[in-house]
Amino acid sequence: MTVTRPDWKVQIRRGDVLSVSGTYDSRRASWYESMAIMSAAFNAGGTGGADPFATAVDAPGVVTHGHLRENDGHGGAFGGLPDPRGLLAGATGGPVTIAGFTYGRGDLNLTGRRGRPPVVRRGRGLTFVNRDARRDVMHTITACRAPCTRTTGIAYPLADGKVDFDSGNLGYGPRGLTAASNRIRWTTPKRLAAGTYTYFCRVHPFMRGSFRVQRRG
């Protein structure tokens, strides 16, 4: 990550349009929370600065920082959570209420009946509702490769489920300025084959859950 030098200035005139863009390597995972945070200062009526139509204004940026200590935590160690593929099936149908940073049913951090994967018949969807949105907290239901039980870090979990699904950020925010989907309900795809599916929250990756699609009959 870089910033421009303190003495870097460019002239603009009334009617000029400024645009910025950011590029991310998404070969391993794609995260819509990744943001190209770019700030700009504007000095109305100021003097100085290069004319971009007469001078090359592109300049190498100054690196903001090196390796950060918090990035040493890659995750992926044994976490002690149960493998949902071996759990008894939970109740049939939904919705699954998300509250207190917990998936109400099928949360792998829960024990007993509430920790069992809820069941939906093949050809139907399981609905999730984010009640934490009332406290301006967003959550996602994002597919990850089963069993999705290892410790959280910068490299785990990934959105690498065998079948790709993602709810988007369930919650609210100003349009165009946030990754919020501006809704609190989401239903899993109805095309899912029979089996157990695991997921996590992109915003709070310690949240892990599962559900099961049951064959018809």
Image (cartoon, rainbow, N blue to C red):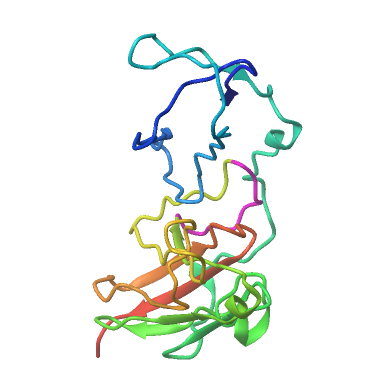
Left or right placement of residue 130 versus residue 150 in this view: left
Q: Tell me residue 127's x, y (percent).
A: 41, 82
Q: Quarter of the image holding residue 206?
A: bottom right
Secondary structure mainly formed by the magenta segment: loop
Task: Tell me: residue 179, above or below residue 76.
Answer: below
Q: Quadrant of the N terminus?
A: top right
Q: Residue 100 is drawn in which quadrant?
A: bottom right
Nearest the eye: 164 or 87: 164
Up/down of 121 relative to 1, above or below: below
View extreme (front): residue:
45
Return the residue nearer the eye: 43 or 156. 43
Q: Is 103 on the left or on the right of 54, as rendered?
A: right
Specify whether residue 173 is painted magenta.
Answer: no
> x and y percent of residue 81 in the render?
65, 63
In this view, the residue in front, 147 or 14, is: 14
Above or below — where is 76 with respect to 217?
Answer: above
At horizontal 43% and vertical 43% (from top left) the residue drawn is 29
Q: Position of residue 52 (x, y in %)?
A: 38, 17
Q: Quadrant of the C terminus?
A: bottom left
- Asked whether 151 falls inside the magenta stretch, the response is yes
Residue 96 locus on image (x, y percent): 50, 84
Q: Is residue 100 left or right of residue 84?
A: right
Residue at 41% across, 67% down: 167
* Residue situated furthest right in the rendering: 69
Q: How many marks?
A: 0
The span picked out in magenta is 145-154
